[in-house]
Image (cartoon, rainbow, N blue to C red):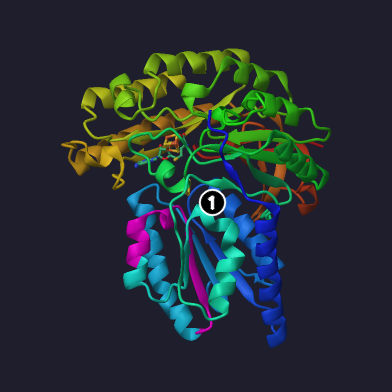
Amino acid sequence: MNTKTTVISQEALDAQFACCDKIAAYWKNKGVTPVAYVETYGCQQNEADSEKLRGYLAQSGYAIGSEAEGADVVIMNTCAIREHAEQRVFGNLGALTHTKHRHPEQKIFLCGCMAGETKVSDRIRQSYPHVDGVFSTHHLWQFPEILWNVLSGKKRQFFIADEPGSIAEGIPQVRDSKLKAWVSIMYGCNNFCTYCIVPYVRGRERSRKFADILAECRELIDGGAKEITLLGQNVNSYGKDLPEGKDFADLLAAIAQLPGDFLIRFMTSHPRDASEKLFDTMAKYPKIAKQLHLPFQSGSSRVLKAMNRHYDRDTYLNKVNYAKKVMPELVLTSDVIVGFPGETEEEFEETISLIQQVHYDSLFTFIFSPRPGTPAASMDDPTPKEEKNRRFDRLCAVQNAISEEIHNNYIGKTMRCLVDGRDKDMLTARTEGGRLVRFAGDDSLIGSYHNITITGATTWSLTGQLQA
Ligand code: SAH
Ligand code: SF4
Ligand code: F3S
């Protein structure tokens, strides 16, 4: 058991807060309120990290803006999961030469998962001289120091040393929503699925302490949060690195027993570690949403083995069947990759048949994207791109029909939903299972639970009517 996770000391964090003070004094001296803009790519983990960057920025005197134009600090918090995600970032980063030209004081930073790749930091060093600093996820806690170094005239900052990773408690956060909060319960990943870059850029799996997570949830609920989403690349292995002897199901149960009217969600669950204990715990507590995101990636046991997923088709299906048995109302979603190197037509058909068997509410579908440095990137991949596109389209068509059918079955049902915002002339709400419902109503409904009768459905969302 690895219990050697580095916990950042209070002293080290205080040194960062001292940099925040220096930055705030620097701007006060100039008599202006500086503006910062943080652009987030990728998954919720990055969203949660951006809330910390905004927390540090607010503590350093920055107002948080909504565009790069005119901002004094621009941070791009990036995602490396697929090649396309990286290309987008490089394109947008290039465009910042113009915003910086119009506002020469602008300081530009790149962080997040791409910053953990040497080839990316090398490219920025050589071809993007307008970028003032690059820092990987391991160095996010040092952002005030990096920013202060840049403001005080030091040369370009590269905080990219490869590390197993650490845990920093007590970084301030400016949350996007008071109503729906992200809580990271662990960082990193140990799984090394052969296609995936995450373990290389986010370091080893490390869990936050049980008591720290519980305290954060309590504070959020007291502050009005109605939905808490627990985050980790593989939440089911929570606690394996802690001496406390508690697992993810124990954590869920403890949060579910906190007083207040709220729902707990979580992502992502790795099927290998999803246990009957987890499903029983979900079934037992009304405050745990009956929603499960359980990525299967492929319906073929041979492909799953090549992906290093450590479960086969039957094990996966058995787990899903158990979960559905103890939670008949379960909303089930998943991730799937089409065109993994060497995937045959028959193996692809196994993916289709798994989807038809499980009947997912919705799917996140991806075409395999080779990530340099991962084992799958150098596997033989004879299937032409056009063929992969064809498989992808077929998969989407099959799933869309299933999603539509499931959504149609909601019509006539009345469901308790959290009203979470407005989209043009309709209010938006979420069912317990996380499905989007649009309905007509007054803004005063936002922020509380209401009963809504479903009157219409599409592949992607539901429409409804508020019950008095
Ligand atoms: N930790 C999560 C997934 C994080 S990445 C889990 O294991 O379930 C989100 C999804 O991106 C993955 O589930 C996978 O379907 C997809 N993905 C990851 N790497 C990919 C790659 N190289 N090409 C295509 N899709 C990929
Ligand atoms: Fe990537 Fe696999 Fe870890 Fe998920 S479990 S982050 S897919 S290596
Ligand atoms: Fe992307 Fe990093 Fe998340 S690679 S998907 S932002 S963990």
Residue under the image location 29 percent in, 27 percent down: 306
Let me know if residue 423 is in the magenta part. Answer: no
Callout 1: CB less than 8 Å from ligand 3: yes
The secondary structure type at the circle numbered 1 is helix
Farthest residue to the bottom: give it: 30
Task: Specify whether residue 408 is in view.
Answer: no
Q: Position of residue 463 (x, y in %)?
A: 62, 40
Task: Specify whether residue 162 is in view.
Answer: yes
Boundaries of the magenta span: 103-123
Q: Position of residue 15 (x, y in %)?
A: 67, 63
Q: Quadrant of the C terminus?
A: top right
Residue carrying label 1: 46
Q: Nearer the viewer, residue 151 or 361?
A: 151
Examine the rendered structure and indicate whether residue 304 appears above or below residue 69: above
Label 1 neighbour load within 10 Å: few <14, some 14-19, many 20+? many
The quarter of the rendering in which ligand 1 is drawn is top left
